[in-house]
Amino acid sequence: MNGPDADPPILSWIRDQDAVARLQRAVRNDRTAQSYLFYGPRGVGKTRTALGVAQALNCTGAEPPCGACLPCRKIARLRHPDVRLLFPATKEEDSHPEEIAKRLEEYGSGRYHLLEYARNASISIDRIRELKAEAAMSLVEGRRRVFILTEAHRMQEEAAQSALKLIEEPPAGTHLILTVEEPAALLPTIVSRCQRVRFRPLRRSSIEEILVAEGGLERPAARLIGSLSEGSLGRALALREEGSKERSIVEIRDDALSLFDLEIEPTKIEERIQQQVRKWAGKLDPNTIRRNAELLLIWCHDLLAVRVGLGTESLANLDRRDRLASEAERIDLARLRAWIDALEEWVESADRNVNPGLGLHELLRRAAATDAGPPRGT
Ligand SMILES: [Zn+2]
């Protein structure tokens, strides 16, 4: 608990969320709502922000939240008795409190650690009952009690009904913060009792910075993952994991690019497929197809950006700018459009479980179709 380098307060390292300043003001002016609903995409900082609010409410430092006082440190590590984080768990996990404690410990130990849940995980009525019992008791050591219910739409029906009473009339000094992707996934009666706070996708540049600074990634890989992650750090971290298992995202992109040819001739399709299948060593499952298609679609967007003269800041494939420049110079827009349509179709074919070889053939056939216009731009 007495580490020499205390972390800065959580709210100071949440990125790209206007909500943070508003929440800080509310705490400073003693106008914190009793029930909040934080909503927005997964992996953008909703749960961390909730912990940051708990720090601000319980900090004993001179300028709260300080991050360094004992309550701040306990909250960051999820060891504060008055601050509880409830997350969806399976029945099996629910019956092993030590497993739950371990997950919380992990979450508290890393700034960018994400809680992951099984598909069938939920928040049970038993855990809501425990919360309510706790809420009825006096505070253990803090100034305010904060209950965070992450992925609150995963409350079981009766759990949600039971939580409703707590959300409607929390005891004095108790705050509830629910997080959810879409408010519509919750009971309307719950949504209407909460102050809603919107969270946005993170900027690509923020994700890129985090992956370089904290994730030890090289810049080109961080940039590509930032572009693929749709503003979710959670998705970015999953992509990083996936990439580190076998090959880096840059290698995967380069392999995908060997398929990409703006001037592909119908007579060359078979040869191309043979080359590519060898490269992928027969491992053309729906996930691989989706990843390759996404990477090629991002390449197409970069080509358009170069073509219309946008600055390099917008490019996901900055490390391949020479190839981008040369392709953008020769680009035929109808052909590029054919590629984009064919790539989208390719993903759909994978989702429909079309034979991968056929799907690949169809991709190239469409991309090479002569009605896409002349192979060269004028
Ligand atoms: Zn503090």
Image (tube, rainbow, N blue to C red):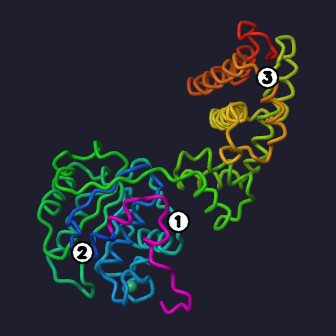
Q: Mark 2 or 3 closer to N-term?
A: 2
Marks 2 and 1, Cα distance to the nearest angstrom? 31 Å
Q: Which mark is residue 158?
A: none
Note whether ligand 1 is within 8 Å of mark 1: no
- Between label 3 and label 1, give the one nearer the viewer: 3
Contact (CB < 8 A) between labels 2 and 1? no
Quadrant of the image occupied by residue 362: top right
- Between label 2 and label 1, give the one nearer the viewer: 2
Which amino acid, mark 1? Answer: His
Secondary structure at badge 1 equals loop
Residue 314 sits inside the magenta stretch: no
Q: Where in the figure is residue 42, as x and y percent of width and height?
A: 45, 52
Q: Is residue 141 above or below residue 244?
A: below
Nearest to the observer: residue 267 or residue 264: 264
Q: Which mark is residue 113?
A: 1
Quadrant of the image occupied by residue 271: top right
The residue identified by callout 2 is 29
Q: What's the residue at 79%, 45% (across, down)?
A: 251
Quadrant where the C terminus is found in the figure: top right
Marks 2 and 3, Cα distance to the nearest angstrom? 59 Å
Callout 2 crowding tier (Cα within 10 Å): few <14, some 14–19, many ≥20 = few
Tally the numbered discs: 3
Q: Where in the figure is residue 215, as x and y percent of width and height?
A: 66, 64
Q: Which residues are magenta?
A: 1-23
The residue identified by callout 3 is 262
Q: Mark 3 or 1 closer to N-term?
A: 1
- Between label 2 and label 3, give the one nearer the viewer: 2
Q: Mark 2 or 1 closer to N-term?
A: 2
Residue 10 sits inside the magenta stretch: yes
| Ligand 1 location (quadrant) | bottom left
Nearest to the observer: residue 236 or residue 370: 370
